[in-house]
Image (cartoon, grey):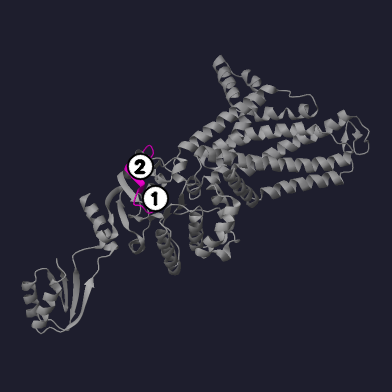
């Protein structure tokens, strides 16, 4: 535990140095100010700020609409915030010292992953709670459904960071890991609409290839489409993208550890 | 711990780096076998690219050997147990610039398994010893190279290691700092620590090391005590007031191993007593002596000779 705390402390100070904290607080502050200064918040022509007695379904819709976009934006920021942390840790002159400590390589990689993940989700949770409190005070209604969205955001960020972590370990480059992540993200989003592409392609081989690619790529975008139904209390709309993405991410994470364990530094 | 037991051992250690699809593979280490006894200061010498850092990296688990084996305290070098009581100051380190001196000790001390309380207890005296107390709360990004070396040394000593690996520890350190580091190393040796020192600075190695190994192009070309490498036939330089050509011929005839250059006589003898015979001979020929000085063979001389010999052998 001492060793993990040391890695967590190091990561926390690096995150602070990279101004990631400030970015989060800036986004939070802007949103807080927007909600405090916003004269009305209309859904279906009902101003929620002036109609505290509106039905809870409408409030849920309001939360779902807001937090759907909010989580998407925050995870986008988290990718940029977290992508450079592993490649910088693997930098020449730094990793040798870490590897000289009495920690197995596998444990070192797992601890570094966990440290980055915990710090990022803690930041997300803190900003979410602050915004939730301000929004709830203005709406005059405190509903806990958004927490389901936060849980999905944690799972989604696990998948996202596992991809970024894998790319970071494999390439030793934060730029390549960010680019690689967005290529995968865009690719999987395009593949989710592959039915349209089939109309223009002849032969079943293309269908097999595109289907195969769809199944082996993490489906971050489709996973995110569950935020609204989940926060509206309808549960997960599409379960396959969630389970398959988590499964693929675990595989990528394990491959990253294998690479880290075998590579010369 | 200074019981003479071998604590660092390599057997047939080789490391080959892949040179890419078109390039040639680089043989950084070729069949290196050596042992370092507990309590000694062992110096690893060699020109740039000789394989010194590769050797240390293999011992500390950063690199995998292509063949052969390496162990520390009897444990295979890639295992956690091998690094349990080891301190390391890497060459060309890039300590996290966002940390302060004390934060760096918290991070790397913690990774070595020390609690915050233990680190607090040790950090003060260690920073004092390396002359960094004043800078403990300053960010590393503001440190000079020498300050980073000093902090790196404190970091390496934090877990009270039995074995210390120092890769160019005085790189960038001023002469006073070098002297201080040398004294620290000698004090650590007195405490029974084993020190594995990589350095280009041969005078430094000569002044602190008990034994050295010389690597060249990945091959071990010499291992032995420093005294053994610097010991040579006794040599002297005798400066005279004036030396006629006739006297010079007489000297050359009587002492074939002597060279005369102007007014200076250079002599290398099998036996130190022979210098007295030479002095008597010169005095009997009315040669006025100005000085008699012994010629010292430095580690650098031996090193250069060995490296040139190895190059000629290739």
Range of magenta residues = B1-23
In depth, the one of A259 and B114 nearer the eye is B114
**Which quadrant of the rendered structure holds the N terminus of chain A?**
top right
User: In which quarter of the view is residue A236 placed?
Assistant: top right
Left or right: where does residue A43 sit relative to residue B242? right
Whether residue B114 is situated above or below residue B238 in the rendered picture: above
Residue at 59% x, 45% y is A2
Residue at 40% x, 49% y is B56
In depth, the one of B283 and A113 nearer the eye is B283
User: In which quarter of the view is residue A177 placed?
Assistant: top right
Whether residue B253 is situated above or below residue A42 in the rendered picture: below
Figure label count: 2
On residue B28, which mark appears? none
Q: CA distance from mark 1 to mark 2?
A: 12 Å
Q: Is residue B4 magenta?
A: yes
- Mark 1 / mark 2, whichever is N-terminal: 2
Q: Which residue is mark 1?
A: B53
Q: Give the percent coordinates (x, y) of residue B238.
A: 18, 77
Using a 10 Å C-alpha cutoff, classify the residue at mark 1 as few (fewer than 14 neighbours), some (14 to 19) or many (20 or more): some
Q: Give the percent coordinates (x, y) of residue B231.
A: 23, 63
In depth, the one of B220 and B9 nearer the eye is B9
On residue B15, which mark appears? 2
């Amino acid at each position: 535990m001492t060793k993990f705390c040391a890695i967590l402390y190091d990561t926390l100070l690096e995150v602070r140095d990279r101004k990631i904290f400030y970015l989060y607080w800036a986004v939070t502050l802007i949103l807080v100010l927007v909600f405090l200064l916003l004269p009305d918040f209309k859904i279906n022509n009902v101003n929620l700020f002036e109609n505290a007695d509106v039905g809870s379904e409408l409030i849920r819709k309001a939360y779902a609409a807001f937090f759907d976009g909010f989580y998407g934006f925050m995870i986008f920021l988290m990718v940029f915030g977290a992508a450079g942390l592993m490649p910088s840790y693997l930098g020449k002159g730094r990793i040798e010292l870490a590897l000289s400590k009495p920690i197995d390589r596998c444990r070192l990689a797992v601890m570094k992953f966990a440290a980055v993940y915990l710090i990022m989700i803690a930041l997300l949770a803190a900003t979410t709670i602050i915004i939730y409190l301000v929004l709830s005070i203005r709406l005059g209604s405190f509903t806990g459904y958004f927490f389901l969205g936060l849980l999905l955001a944690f799972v989604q960020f696990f998948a996202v960071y596992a991809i970024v972590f894998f790319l970071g370990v494999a390439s030793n480059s934060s730029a390549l890991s960010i680019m690689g992540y967005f290529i995968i993200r865009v690719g999987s989003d395009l593949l989710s609409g592959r039915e349209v592409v089939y109309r223009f392609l002849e032969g079943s081989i293309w269908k097999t290839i595109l289907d195969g690619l769809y199944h082996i790529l993490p489906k971050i975008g489709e996973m995110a489409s569950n935020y609204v139904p989940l926060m509206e209390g309808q549960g997960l709309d599409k379960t396959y993208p969630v389970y398959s993405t988590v499964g693929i991410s675990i595989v990528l994470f394990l491959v990253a550890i294998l690479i880290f364990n075998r590579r010369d530094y | 711990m200074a019981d003479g037991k071998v604590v660092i051992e390599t057997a047939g250690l080789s490391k080959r780096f892949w040179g890419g699809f078109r390039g040639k593979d680089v043989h950084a280490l070729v069949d290196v076998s050596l042992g370092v006894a507990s309590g000694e200061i062992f110096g690893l010498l060699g020109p740039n690219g000789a394989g010194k850092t590769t050797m240390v990296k293999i011992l500390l688990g950063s690199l995998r050997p292509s063949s052969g084996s390496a162990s520390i305290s009897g444990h295979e070098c890639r295992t956690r147990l091998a690094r349990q009581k080891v301190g390391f100051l890497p060459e060309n380190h890039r300590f996290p610039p966002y940390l302060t001196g004390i934060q760096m000790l918290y991070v790397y001390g913690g990774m070595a398994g020390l609690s915050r309380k233990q680190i607090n207890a040790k950090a003060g005296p260690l920073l004092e010893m390396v002359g960094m107390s004043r800078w403990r709360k300053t960010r590393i990004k503001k440190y000079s190279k020498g300050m980073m070396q000093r902090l790196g040394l404190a970091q390496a000593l934090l877990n009270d290691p039995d074995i210390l690996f120092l890769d160019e520890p005085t790189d960038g350190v001023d002469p006073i700092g070098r002297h201080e580091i040398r004294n620290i190393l000698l004090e650590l040796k007195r405490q029974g620590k084993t020190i594995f020192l990589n350095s280009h600075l041969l005078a430094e190695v000569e002044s602190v090391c008990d034994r050295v190994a010389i690597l060249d192009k990945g091959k071990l070309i010499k291992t032995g005590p420093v005294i053994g490498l610097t010991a040579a036939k006794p040599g002297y330089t005798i400066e005279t007031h004036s030396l006629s050509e006739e006297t010079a011929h007489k000297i050359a005839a009587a002492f074939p191993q002597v060279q005369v250059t102007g007014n200076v006589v250079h002599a290398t003898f099998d036996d130190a007593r022979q210098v007295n015979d030479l002095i008597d001979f010169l005095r009997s020929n009315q040669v006025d002596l100005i000085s008699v000085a012994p010629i010292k063979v430095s580690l650098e001389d031996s090193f250069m000779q060995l490296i040139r010999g190895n190059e000629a052998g290739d």
